[in-house]
Image: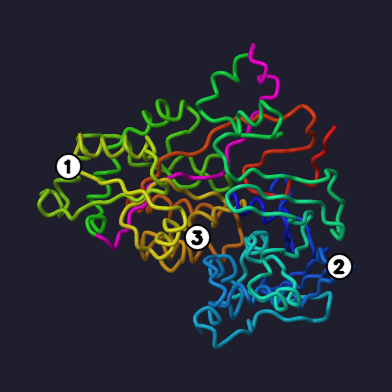
């Protein structure tokens, strides 16, 4: 999420999301959709340029999408976000021997045609994700792997300095097609950990408020209270992942036993002080397609014991070693993971070892579907459509289905939803699939986000918090 929030300020694509999460024109000023709903013709704006002054053409878009699909690039998201385009899957599976995507056609410098496999109402939304953003073919080809050190983009800002894990500096892009940014620059603190002290010393202008400081700044007598603003819930789901191909999580009764053995209310109230809401379903409240009628696997110690007795791992001697992997280095593991492990042990006698690994290793192992059980992560919506939760995370062939979950009935509902034009009917199909996923204990939903808090200096105007990542710094003013 941190990287995506930076990328959308430096790079851009054909379309984008506004702060109301509507899809709006970006580098494409307009587009036409064929009668069969499969061919999109994008008309690029006049005189759009990269930040180095080079002209942006339809060929750059074609090249950028083909580059994303090329296995040599190593994109983990190309199939998920671009796979509807005809020819993308073939390029990914060809292992580098095929580079042309047949569903992309350059009509002229200002016109790009994209053909998808079937009509899909959410296809435009997927193009707001960074995988579909444009790069300069000329610049990236010239610079080779060093292009990222001084990236050339089409967003409202340009990166001027980057110190890994420390700071990232941006300045306005003089060649940006739209309204120019109103600030002289942005400095992002990537180190974290000390932002409250930095805020009090006027070293940062905007910071989130952690649990440790929340009571203090909510006190009307505290000098920081006047800067306190509400942050809307992120459209996200925090969960524990089960790899259903690995024992003991290959047994649905064992997964259900663990799911019923945890009191999520304790975690929400005691650990997160009411800043999270226990999750028993997949799609977050307030999100398109959310249903309050999904029946989750609620806390029930007796039922948990019954499911364990029914499972093939009822006898502790039959159970393999269980390791829950979390991101982090050296510090104490998250309190929520420890509390959940204790509940499993107390109620079911199931022992779990907590293993911390570096973030990069954690992501790599998760993406390669190597983890047995994992915590400390979740899914944040990339666009406002339930397809981004149900299809992306649980379709059996999805690259992001990290737990190898597979249910042919769920797949059938997902495939039917992909081409359903009526959104109400489509959302119902997703809810049917969602109920099956929950019944199968495919993952262990933990919590949804609720309103959070941040501090914003009184001289900062125009900064808005949004439940999905959108470009937002260009509208900020310092008074």
Give residue 392's mark: 3
Q: CA distance from mark 3 to mark 1?
A: 32 Å
Task: Say if 245 sits above or below 157 in the image.
Answer: below
- Asked whether 238 falls inside the magenta stretch, the response is yes
Q: Which residue lies most toward the top here?
A: 221
Q: Residues within 10 Å of mark 2 (few under 14, many from 20)?
A: few
Q: How many marks?
A: 3
Q: CA distance from mark 2 to mark 1?
A: 67 Å
Q: Which residues are magenta?
A: 220-246
Indicate the quadrant where residue 199 lies. top right
Q: CA distance from mark 2 to mark 3?
A: 37 Å
Residue depth check, mark 2 versus mark 3: number of the one nearer the observer: 2
Give residue 384's mark: none
Could you tell me if residue 77 is visible in this image? yes
Q: Report whether 216 appears left or right of 56.
A: left
- Where's residue 420, x and y in %? 57, 63
The residue lying toward the viewer, choosing from 53 and 235, is 53
Q: Earlier in the sequence, mark 2 or mark 1?
A: 2
- Residue to which mark 1 is pinned: 306
Instruction: Find numbered disc 3 in the image and state the secondary structure of the residue it sits on.
Output: helix
Give residue 53's mark: 2
The residue lying toward the viewer, choosing from 378 and 87, is 378
Q: Residues within 10 Å of mark 3 (few under 14, many from 20)?
A: some
- Asked whether 188 falls inside the magenta stretch, the response is no
Instruction: Find numbered disc 1 in the image and state the secondary structure of the residue it sits on.
Output: helix
At a point 54% along the width and 82% down the height, the residue shown is 90
């Amino acid at each position: 999420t941190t990287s995506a929030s930076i990328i959308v300020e430096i790079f851009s694509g054909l379309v984008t999301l506004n702060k109301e999460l509507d899809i709006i024109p970006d580098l494409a000023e307009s587009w036409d959709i064929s009668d069969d709903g499969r061919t999109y013709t994008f008309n690029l704006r006049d005189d759009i340029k990269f930040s180095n002054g080079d002209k942006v053409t339809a060929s750059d878009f074609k090249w950028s999408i083909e580059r994303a699909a090329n296995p040599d690039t190593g994109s983990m998201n190309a199939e998920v976000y671009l796979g509807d385009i005809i020819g993308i899957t073939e390029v990914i599976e060809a292992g580098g021997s095929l580079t042309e995507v047949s569903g992309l056609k350059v009509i002229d410098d200002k016109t790009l045609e994209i053909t998808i496999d079937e009509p899909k109402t959410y296809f435009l939304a997927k193009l707001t994700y960074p995988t579909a953003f444009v790069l300069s073919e000329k610049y990236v080809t010239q610079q080779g792997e060093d292009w990222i050190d001084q990236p050339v983009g089409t967003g409202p800002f340009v990166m001027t300095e980057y110190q890994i894990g420390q700071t990232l500096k941006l300045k306005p892009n003089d060649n940006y097609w739209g309204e120019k940014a109103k600030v002289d620059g942005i400095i992002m603190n990537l180190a974290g950990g000390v932002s409250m002290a930095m805020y009090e010393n006027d070293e940062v202008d905007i910071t989130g408020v952690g649990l440790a400081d929340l009571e203090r700044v909510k006190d009307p007598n505290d000098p920081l209270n006047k800067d306190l603003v509400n942050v809307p819930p992120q459209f996200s789901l925090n969960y524990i992942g089960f790899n259903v191909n690995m024992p003991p999580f290959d047994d649905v009764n064992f997964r259900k036993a663990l799911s019923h053995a945890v009191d999520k209310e304790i975690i929400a109230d005691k650990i997160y002080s009411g800043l999270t809401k226990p999750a028993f379903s997949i799609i977050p409240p307030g999100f398109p397609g959310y249903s309050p009628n999904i029946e989750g696997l609620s806390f029930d110690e007796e039922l948990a014991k019954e499911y364990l007795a029914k499972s093939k791992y009822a006898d502790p001697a039959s159970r393999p070693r269980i390791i829950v992997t979390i991101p982090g280095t050296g510090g104490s593991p998250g309190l929520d993971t420890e509390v959940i492990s204790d509940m499993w042990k107390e109620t079911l006698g199931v022992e779990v070892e907590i293993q911390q690994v570096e973030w990069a290793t954690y992501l790599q192992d998760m993406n390669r579907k190597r983890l047995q059980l994992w915590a400390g992560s979740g899914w944040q919506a990339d666009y406002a459509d339930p397809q981004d939760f149900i299809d992306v995370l649980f379709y059996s062939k999805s690259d992001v289905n990290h737990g190898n979950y597979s249910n042919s009935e769920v797949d059938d509902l997902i495939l039917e939803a992909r081409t359903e034009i009526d959104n109400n009917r489509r959302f119902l199909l997703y809810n049917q699939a969602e109920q099956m996923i929950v019944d199968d204990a495919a993952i262990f939903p933990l919590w949804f986000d609720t309103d959070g808090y941040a501090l914003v200096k009184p001289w900062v105007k125009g900064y808005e918090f949004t439940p999905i990542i959108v470009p937002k710094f260009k509208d900020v003013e310092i008074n």
